[in-house]
Image (cartoon, helix red, strand yellow):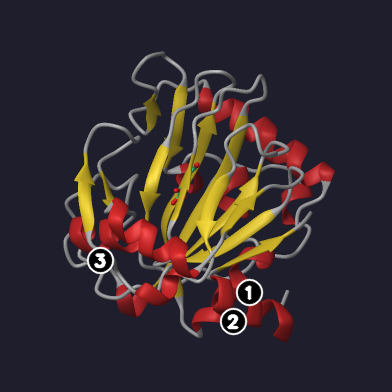
Amino acid sequence: MRLTPAQLRQFNEDGVLILPNLFSDAEVEVLRAAMNRVLTQDNPANIREKKSEVVRTAMGLHVRDEVFARLSRHPRFVEPARQITGQNLYIQQSKINVKEAFTGEVWQWHQDFPTHHRDDGVPRPEALNLHVLLDDVNEFNGPLYFIRGSHRFGPAASIYDTTTTSHPLWVIDPGVVRQMTDKGDLISAKGKAGTALIFGECVAHCSPPNLSPWTRAIFSLILNPVANRFTNPKRPEYIHHRDLTPVTPLHDGCLLDELEPVA
Ligand SMILES: O=C(O)CCC(=O)C(=O)O
């Protein structure tokens, strides 16, 4: 699947591209069944909310479940990512973030790059983050917010937050968030389950707590150019994978094929 010139233009202007209904209802059903499998596992890569036992982030998914192994090599993800970057890509991270109904907590304003750069030694902001919504996401159940065009600020001054998110994260100084929102409005990434997002390393994003009665889960895949690989492999492998094999796309119907064990 290739992005159209208009989609590429929008990605370059906004720093994020929303692709409504990229995955079908039948594919979402397969993904949700796999999500239910991994969320019930007792695994150190399942990180729980501080105030409850609910899993907030389940990581390392492409090596834990065949369905996520396929999703991480899906042509509707891998082909646009190769088109945008023009490079061979490895799977840096695959995860699900759950924002549980009533209790799901905040993700502070951040860019992905400061954490990848400072914590993993990724040299340049060239990776892409690809999301699929696994629930219908509305304005109430914790959609991601993006600051349109904020990627043009480049890597921003950040503060190390070790308390509010699933794992320590470099979050953007509030003064810089104000400067960014003086220049660009906010985008709320809402849509039906199956909607996808593609965004780059420097676009500012966050998500509010979920006080609604509707749980919000998203799958996130980070693909990074092999030539831009980590230089400081100190975080657990489920946070930044070390296998640099370039991802090659599977066939388009791969999620609906019968399941076989992960190779
Ligand atoms: O799940 C969320 O709300 C935040 C996700 C996020 O910030 C990310 O994937 O970088």
Q: Is residue 177 left or right of residue 18?
A: left
Q: Secondary structure at mark 3?
A: loop
Q: Which residue carries the number 1 mark?
A: 79
Residue 30 screen position, x and y as percent: 73, 39
Q: Label 3 belongs to which residue? A: 230
- The answer to whether marks 2 and 1 mark residues whose Cβ atoms lie closer than 8 Å is yes
- Amino acid at the residue labelled 3: Phe
Please determine whether, in this image, residue 11 is positioned above or below residue 163. Answer: below
Mark 2 sits near ligand 1, with its Cβ under 8 Å away: no
* Quarter location, residue 241: bottom left
> Residue at the location (76% across, 57% down)?
20
Name the residue carrying label 2: 83
Label 1 vs 3, first from the N-terminus: 1
165, 33: nearer the viewer: 165
Q: Is residue 208 visible?
A: yes
Residue type of the residue flagged with mark 1: Glu
Residue at x-position 37% and y-position 57% = 177
Q: Secondary structure at mark 1?
A: helix
Give the x, y percent position of residue 23: 76, 53
User: CA separation, marks 2 and 1?
Assistant: 6 Å
